[in-house]
Image (cartoon, rainbow, N blue to C red):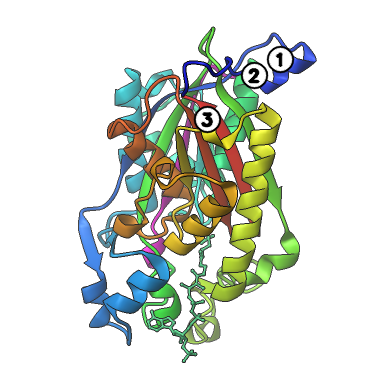
Amino acid sequence: MSAAAPPVQHPRAKDGFRGRTCSITAVGSYVPTRVLTNADLEKMVDTTDEWITSRTGIKERRIAARDEYTSDIAAQAATRALHHAGLTANQLDLIILATITPDMLFPSTACLVQRKIGAHRAAAFDIEAACSGFIFGLEIGQQFIMSRTYNTILVIGAEKLSTIIDWSDRSTCVLFGDGAGAAILQNRPNSHGLLTVCMGSDGNKADLLSMPGGGSRCPATEKSVADRLHYLRMDGKETFKSAIGAMLTAAQEALRRCDIDIGRIKCVIPHQANQRIIDAVGERLGVRPDQVFVNVDRYGNTSAASVAIALDEAVRSGRVQRGDLILLVVFGAGLTWGAAVIEW
Ligand code: ACO
């Protein structure tokens, strides 16, 4: 940030707000150890490294072991975030877990994580906003902190997408990977933390990206399995177009609310779905390439975990320092989208 830049004012301060604010006091992430490269995919479906790289920017992704579930991946990320915060699990008041690949329909994966990490005092629930889930989780957590309902909240984005991918469909199987990211939310006096979070949805476009089977509309039957309804389906072209427009709108709205010019953002962390989407959004926002954090080449699209993993990596690598301004911007099935401005 330039030395001459005026201090950032919390958007709510304009209305005379003097209450609590919400900070992300630590982050953590975890990706499974098994790497699936584009060369590996060339042996599985009719594709090439050249096609995948030029259309998506993805070179490899992580795939969880058969007996490593979303709750395990989430618990690893949570444990790392707690360690970085210097907290123990029994200090948590609430666990919010965003996923489209829960261990099972119920109980919630958040409850399974609560058991795994020993967060005995915490309430726990899942949310589902697809790739936007982590930002939606941050906003829900922030509301609990600002209302003084809870003091210490764990927000997790975690996915084992490899279980809902049709490994015979080359148009989708090259895009996704497994992983988890987690953040600790707390009130820190004299700190701005989360400046604003914008969220949006458009259920009219629900069919662009969905998994039709397994819910109340289409429970599992021999036919639903034979028809491959328990796998993710996507209209790639339409999803691509909607993603760029929605991410741009969300990012601009978040910046407008904070009265911050994009030039003051140290690090833009977009949903890691596709390098071409990241480039298009970055170009329209007017960001320099060095402002944008990218790891889609190594992990592919990890849905709700995507920006959470990227935020942790940006912090660990020193790309983001305390006091820097960060812009998170996401897009996912629903459709859903969102953006957050954070004073780190
Ligand atoms: N390898 C080789 N060829 C392929 C592959 C592949 N893996 N996949 C598709 N093709 C072929 C198609 O069959 C098609 O061939 P044809 O012209 O003979 O019919 C050709 O490549 C072009 O296919 P398109 O679908 O038009 O390719 P496009 O340039 O649109 O790129 C892609 C496809 C990468 C999926 C792009 O549309 C995209 O990124 N969409 C957005 C995806 C996304 O971000 N989804 C996540 C949203 S968030 C969430 O909630 C999960």
| The image quarter in which residue 329 lies | top right
Q: Which residue is mark 3?
A: 264
On residue 13, the disc is 1
Left or right for 286, reference 109: right
In this rendering, position of residue 95 left or right of residue 37: right
First in sequence: mark 2 or mark 3?
2
Q: Is residue 206 above or below residue 48?
A: above
Which amino acid type corresponds to the residue marked 1 in the rendered image? Ala
**Dot 2: few (<14), some (14–19), or many (≥20) neighbours within 10 Å?**
many
Query: How far apart, in angstroms, are the residues tagged by discs 2 and 1?
Result: 5 Å
User: Magenta segment: does it hold 150?
Assistant: yes
Cα separation between marks 2 and 3: 15 Å
Report the disc number at residue 321. none
Residue lying farthest to the right in this orientation: 15
- The answer as to whether callout 2 falls within 8 Å of ligand 1 is no
Residue 44 appears in which quarter of the rendering? bottom left
Q: Are marks 2 and 3 in contact (CB under 8 Å)?
A: no
Does residue 215 appear in the picture of this structure? Answer: no
Q: Residue 287 versus residue 337: which sits nearer the camera?
A: 287
Residue 253: percent from left, percent from top: 69, 40
> Which residue is rendered at x = 42% and y = 59% of the image?
301
